[in-house]
Amino acid sequence: MTPQDEAAGVLVTPATAQQNHDCTDHSTAQKTGTFKPWRTMGFDRSKLPDPVAFYDARGLKLLGRGKWRTTCCEFHGGSDSMRINIDTGAFICMAGCGARGGDVVAYSMAADGYDFKAACRALGAWVEGQPIRPLKPTPLSARAALQAMNPEIMLAAVAAGNVANGVPLTDADQARLLLAAQRFIRIAELFA
């Protein structure tokens, strides 16, 4: 990394450090002082506005009940063709104009012509000048956690089916189900 990059506050990641040939791994970079961990800017999903408030502020009336609400489509002018998920902010036009996205950031990008960073800034979800929270390392990958939970999930599903059909659980079944629940909790705590 050049002194000009340092002065400009360039974000240095392992990939950019290798591109600049300043170092070949984290330990060398940390010893030489050329590696600065991800530090001063980034997207913070927790700062996004509530989807209902976001769409109301844009003048869209959300009609109906349930998770998906109906409104007009700003993209083609349809009166009631847009569906909006009030939990995630996802949207899709059912009239076929092609408007769709997974959250309010995607809507802002499509409706206002912003790129990702500009949309996040406009929504107040782009953090600058503050350290970014590092991700908490987990002892196993998400895939490994799901594989470990699979037998427990199957056991819980069979037990639920038995109870639903009037088959009582034995003491051994209840003890095994309790053990499965404790394993669920332990694995969930790893990713919390």
Image (tube, grey):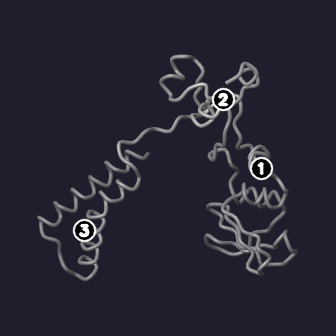
Q: Circle 1 sits on which residue?
A: 119
Residue 146 position in % (x across, y down): 36, 58
How far apart are labels 3 and 1 at the CA level? 45 Å
Residue 73 position in % (x across, y down): 81, 72
Instruction: Name the residue at 24% across, 68% down.
Output: 155
Identified by mark 3, the residue type is Leu
Q: Taking 35 as reference, is 157 left or right?
A: left
Which residue is situated farthest in the front direction here?
21
User: Secondary structure under badge 1?
Assistant: helix
Q: Are marks 3 and 2 in contact (CB under 8 Å)?
A: no
Q: Circle 3 sits on which residue?
A: 155
The image quadrant that residue 175 belongs to is bottom left
Q: Is residue 176 above or below residue 94?
A: above
Q: Is residue 156 above or below residue 113?
A: below
Neighbourhood count class around disc 2 (C-alpha, 10 Å): few under 14, some 14–19, many 20 upward: few
Quarter of the image with the N terminus is top right
Q: Taking 177 as reference, is 146 left or right?
A: right
Which residue is situated farthest in the right direction here?
77
Q: Which mark is residue 144?
A: none
User: In front here: 63 or 31?
Assistant: 31
Instruction: Name the residue at 84% across, 78% down.
Output: 79
Quarter of the image with the C terminus is top left
Q: Circle 2 sits on which residue?
A: 130
User: In front here: 89 or 133?
Assistant: 133
- Looking at the rendered structure, the number of numbered marks drawn on it comes to 3
User: Secondary structure under badge 3?
Assistant: helix
